[in-house]
Amino acid sequence: MGWIVFGICAWLVGWLTNVWLARQPKSQATSLAVPVIFGVTLILIWESVVRGFGISPVLLPPPSVIAERFSQSADILWIDFVQTVIKGALSGYVIGCGAAFVIAVTVDRFPFLQRGVLPVGNFVAALPIIGMAPIMVMWFGFDWQSKAAVVVVMVFFPMLVNTVQGLQASDAMQRDLMRTYAAGYWKTLLKLRLPSAMPFVFNGLKIASTLALIGAIVAEFFGSPVKGMGFRISTSVGQLALDLVWAEIVVAAIVGSAFYGGVALLERAVTFWHPSQRG
Amino acid sequence: MRNVLPVLTVVAVIFVAWYIGAVALNATWAQDNAARAGVELSFTELVADTLSQDKPKLPAPHQVAVEIWETTVEKNITSRRSLVYHSWITMSATLLGFVLGTGLGIALAVGIVYNRTMDMSVMPWVIASQTIPILAIAPMIIVVLNAIGITGLFPKAVISMYLSFFPVVVGMVKGLRSPDRMQLDQMKTWHANGIQEFWKLRFPSSMPYLFTSLKVGMAASLVGAIVGELPTGAVAGLGARLLAGSYYGQTVQIWSALIMAAVLAACLVGIIGLAQRLVLKRMGMA
């Protein structure tokens, strides 16, 4: 009973604070504090609902248990992190995005191909490519190579479409100016068209960063060595060790945001001139 | 129309690459077999063999086409061996999840646009959640919902729902905020109340954004339904076909399920695209 009262109190306090903060003039402090308070309130309510109503930890473990598990199994989580994120997702991400970039630049030289690649790429990017996972596991074995291959296939088309579009982003006036400077194809590419493609390229890189993690994790559902985040999630669910599953999800969330944030920071450094980055 | 020829060229290139890949990948198996039987394969024999193996590493397009034809047209659609049956299972979960996710997403977007507290508290989390590999929770949702007695269609639909939910929220918030100051002022001078402003200005001008995010949401929702079928142990659905195929090394079955999923995705997204064109044309926006 005490927990339920506590939960209701936490909800009231959190909500009223946020209502009050939202009425204040908008500043950096308030726009940071409000979501943080919302998140903390949500966790407190979760904790008190689980404890107050006596929900079995097999269904939904309270956040405190998850946090405890997180600190206890740091070594397992680290092994899984290295297997899935570093070996699987990151290597696939680099190969896939790199290949897509090179092919996009090549395709861009041939307007005929370019008009064909864009619709096909857009179409393929909407397909459930994750289904390639069992095939890749069959081709490349259970270890991280097959996960990297799934990631390559998943990130390839979004990246290709964005880069091809980006290379068209420079307008005729700018290209004419390069011509008047007697700049050849390579010079125009390096000094004008690649820089102006960068906002699109980074858009592709950001989409790909989320896809890479999803691909690496889901591919492990189809078979993997006895480590990796997807392996741990699917086996721990089977053993009803949901606290470990949630700990893995916390890791996935942190990695996902960090990955995305890293790409966004890089974008800010590279495309500092773009209106959307000047603030 | 001028894109037809280039698109066909690219598609042709993909098919040629597929055939070459099939020959290259299946050649080892064919040659091993030939060596065991003590015969030397000529090049044409080798190609013929690689394109007609029973469990090839990479089945050739025509093998997949034959498999799809046999499992859709020639099988009774209620049969468990029919791909139509499995596609129907997956599609119903996808559509249920999509409808739920879209409804929830629009409701939350309205809340975010009209309530400042909600905007400041929820919106950052919605945006942050886009960067999280949320699909990883799928097995847990299935098992937990099974444990409390909810089975069948609904658990898969829940996964589809939360995958299609976020794109819709983000798109709709953008869309509902797309009318500019001038238009909002105009509504004010016409003495429009909040509800009229919503139905006559904000909601109509959010339509292009809504349809774009519906397409993303539909594609995501299908992925959710397919992945949601994996942890239940391959009962029914396209995801189950994929898993069963990978257990038994039935590559042709995997590829046909994959192509079927692609066709399904193309149809569902295509229908939304058609609706988009009709609605926007009717509204004078396209």
Image: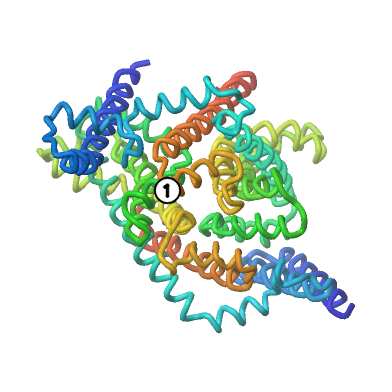
Residue farthest along the front direction in this orientation: B37
Identify the residue at image location x=68%, y=65%. Answer: A25
Question: In this image, B35 relative to B52: left or right?
Answer: left
Task: Provide the residue designation for mark 1.
Answer: A134
Tag count in the figure?
1
Describe the colour scheme in one phrase: rainbow
Which residue is at 42% across, 61% downward? Answer: A224
Q: In which chain is the residue bearing label 1? A: A
**Could you say which is closer to the camera, residue A183 or residue A258?**
A258
Tell me if residue A37 comes above or below residue B77 in the rendering: below
Q: Is residue B47 left or right of residue B237?
A: left
| Residue A196 in sight in this render | yes
Residue B101 x %, y %: 67, 44
Quadrant location of the C terminus of chain B in the rendered image: top right
Residue A200 shows in the view: no
Q: Which is more toward the observer, A89 or B69?
A: B69
- Residue depicted at x 56% and y 40%: B222
- Asked whether, in this view, residue B93 is left or right of residue A53, the answer is left
Q: Is residue A122 above or below residue A256?
A: above
Res B146 → quadrant: bottom right
Q: Classify 10 Å Cα crowding around label 1: few (below 14), some (14-19), many (20 and above).
A: many
Location of residue A261 in the rendering, given as x and y in whole percent from the top left corner: 45, 63
In the image, what residue type sits under mark 1?
Pro
Identify the secondary structure beneath mark 1.
helix
**Front residue of this view, candidates B185 and A65:** A65
Name the residue rendered at 65%, 54% in the picture: B142
Which quadrant of the rendered structure holds the N terminus of chain B? top left
Q: Position of residue B6 (x, y in %)?
A: 29, 22
- Describe residue A38's horizontal placement relative to residue B196 as left or right: left
Judged from this view, the residue extending furthest toward the top is B1
Residue B183: give x, y in percent of width and height. Answer: 66, 35
